[in-house]
Image (cartoon, helix red, strand yellow):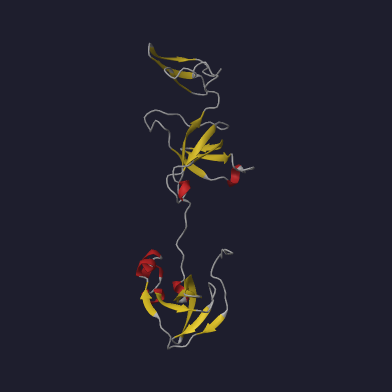
């Protein structure tokens, strides 16, 4: 079986059906409201459709003249009845041929790592590792959401690694969730997880260890 993906409505062949065949008339109001309903200029009659059964094989997008109107094949399924293949079609008006967005459910909760290209206020541009090239001028700005919240944090620095976190499967408004440290095990001040340090690129550092809490200027990088 061959699968076909159409971008836009497929322009199929023209057919005509006799008006005296068996059919079922329906109205898909759920899809009508999902598409935007009256607010976007649609009318509920656009989502009126016929269901028919036939031994004839039609394709998605075929124009069927039926009941003194043009309708289009939007869906079909096939099943075996005795020794025959029967097709069940949905014939919709042209404005009612509508497909909801199909999202990748695996995207929800996913993080993509990349390098920081630029920082503008509380927003960050990234060159994701999955992309071979990324021009800074064409890069998108993403909001920065530090893991510590807004109580105490410093902005990311150009050239460091960060993760782009997707809140849901739509991919709308992903967040840069924090810096990715690549030398945590080899750096003397981060190899012991019971000892925490908060430092800046200017040398200021806050030491938070079980035996000591003090602030001083030093270089926290090994």
Query: Number of labelled discs?
Result: 0
Q: Give the side of residue 41 with respect to residue 11, left or right.
A: left
Q: Quadrant of the C terminus?
A: top right
- For the residue pair 40 and 61, the one nearer the viewer reads as 61
**Residue 141: where, in percent of width, then height?**
51, 43
- For the residue pair 192 and 133, the one nearer the viewer reads as 192
The residue shown at (54%, 67%) is 8
Residue 39 position by quadrant: bottom left
Outermost right residue: 132
Outermost top residue: 211
**Residue 150: where, in percent of width, then height?**
38, 33
Residue 134 position by quadrant: top right
The residue shown at (49%, 76%) is 72
Q: Give the side of residue 117 with respect to residue 176, left or right.
A: right
**Residue 189: where, in percent of width, then height?**
49, 17
**Residue 129: where, in percent of width, then height?**
59, 39
Residue 62 position by quadrant: bottom right
The residue shown at (45%, 62%) is 100
Q: Quadrant of the N terminus?
A: bottom right
- For the residue pair 151 and 1, the one nearer the viewer reads as 1
């Amino acid at each position: 079986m061959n699968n076909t993906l159409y971008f836009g409505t497929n322009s199929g062949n023209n057919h005509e059906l006799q008006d005296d065949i068996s059919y079922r008339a329906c109205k898909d109001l759920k899809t009508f409201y999902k598409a935007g309903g009256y607010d976007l200029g649609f009318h509920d009659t656009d989502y009126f459709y016929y269901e028919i059964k036939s031994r004839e094989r039609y394709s998605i997008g075929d124009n069927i003249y039926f009941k003194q109107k043009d309708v289009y094949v939007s869906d079909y399924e096939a099943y075996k009845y005795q020794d025959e293949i029967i097709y069940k079609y949905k014939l919709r008006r042209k404005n009612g041929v509508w497909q909801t967005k199909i999202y990748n459910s695996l995207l929800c909760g996913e993080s993509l790592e990349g390098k920081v290209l630029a920082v503008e206020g509380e927003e960050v541009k990234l060159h994701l590792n999955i992309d071979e090239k990324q021009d800074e001028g064409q890069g998108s700005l993403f909001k920065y959401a530090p893991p510590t919240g807004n109580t105490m944090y410093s902005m990311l620095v150009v050239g460091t690694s960060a993760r782009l976190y997707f809140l849901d499967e739509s991919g709308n408004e992903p967040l840069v969730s924090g810096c990715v440290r690549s030398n945590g095990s080899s750096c003397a001040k981060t190899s012991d997880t019971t000892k925490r340090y908060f430092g800046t690129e200017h040398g200021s550092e806050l030491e938070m260890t079980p035996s000591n809490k003090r602030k001083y200027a030093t270089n926290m990088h090994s």
